[in-house]
Image (cartoon, helix red, strand yellow):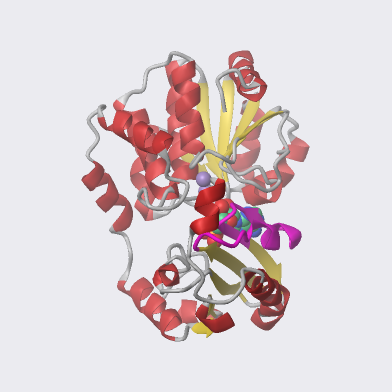
Amino acid sequence: MSPASPDRAAFRDFVARHRRFLLTTHINPDGDGLGSEAAMALWLAAQGKEARVLNDSVVPPAFAFLARHAPFESFEVEVAEQRFGAADALIVLDTSNRQRIGRLAPVIDRFPIPVAVVDHHVSHARGFGQVNVIEPEASATGEILYDLILEDGATITPEIAEALYVALMTDTGSFRYSNTDTHAHRMAAELLTHGLDPQRLHAQVHSHASAGRLRFFGEVLSALELRADGRLVVLEASPEHFQRHGLAGADTDGLVDLPRTIAGVEVVALFSEVEPGKVKVSLRSTGRVSIDQVCSRLGGGGHVHAAGVLLRGSRADARARVLPELEALIAALGPAGAERGGSAAATGARAGSR
Ligand code: AMP
Ligand code: MN
Ligand code: MN
């Protein structure tokens, strides 16, 4: 998207017109959501504006270091009412789906402050803000913020660089997903000139797993099912799995990505019963099948090659709603063994992670 984009101009105007900002991102926040919040908060502070961060969920330990530069809080009713009462604008980062900001969504109805959305997801493309900067071609929300900061002529400080690097690194799967293009690499290279240590940042983000998490991964992976001539991998996690290994239900990040490495796999589906009767479906494509619509039809969303949806009912119900569609999409590719990755690359299709 060019600097001349009317949405970007509207966002700049939105920032100029307000002074006390509240920032938020999606439930179970990731490096892009949290890194974008930290960068946005720092950029606003540099303009002499107030910025607070309030999320539905707590900051996972892997990203706690980002919170040292910005006031991060997690949802409590009284805190939410105070923060909404004190803010004159809300900026929602890394989701354009109102449901995905969790318990903050109903608070907006009671405190109708103006909302701006900055996001890179394909689905829900209209956004729910008065201003919506939604650019699905961006590999991360942090990439859009990076452009906005540079277009503004503002300074990328080492702290902003660190936050944006974490956003970019995590959403591109450490620069290996198909959303990793020249812009992402140029941005990474430029951020490194601010004195970042990429190895240290990578270790900081990826050295927080518990032994239980690996045992949980092992247990779920050892039961993986191959369907559709080995082109569809299905994983299931039950509430008992989570309990046995002392994990919260949302803690499956990274699991669904692992079977993508199996030769010949087109799609991976993880059915994770995060609590009894609530199944989080995570889908990944290795490049040829677009799976975002399978999720958006069911009320979820995501990117062309990484999408999700939360379904009520049993794991069997969720499977019945999702697997036939995936099998049909895979069957439409033709016989197994056809060359992998060709069509997505040829059409320039881009897949994000989150
Ligand atoms: P996940 O499988 O949770 O890593 O999510 C993959 C992608 O799908 C990310 O871009 C998420 O933002 C998106 N996504 C996951 N769950 C939902 C949902 N319930 N609604 C909309 N988008 C989702
Ligand atoms: Mn995200
Ligand atoms: Mn993102």
In this rendering, the answer to whether 90 lies above or below 251 is: above
Which quarter of the picture shows residue 65? top left
* Image coords of residue 320 (percent x, y): 71, 79
Residue 6 relative to residue 32: left or right: right
Report whether residue 227 is seen: no
Q: Is residue 45 above or below residue 139?
A: above
Q: Residue at x 42, y 41 (%)?
A: 181
Residue at x 57% of width, y 65% of height: 283
Q: Residue at x 64, y 50 (%)?
A: 100
User: Over which residues does the magenta segment extend?
Assistant: 286-308
Q: Quadrant of the N terminus?
A: top right
**What residue appears at the point 53 percent right and 63 percent down from the top-left corner?**
284
Classify residue 123 as left or right of residue 257. Answer: right
Measured along the vertical axis of the image, is residue 31 above or below residue 208? Answer: above
Q: Is residue 172 left or right of residue 21?
A: left
The image quarter containing residue 88 is: top right
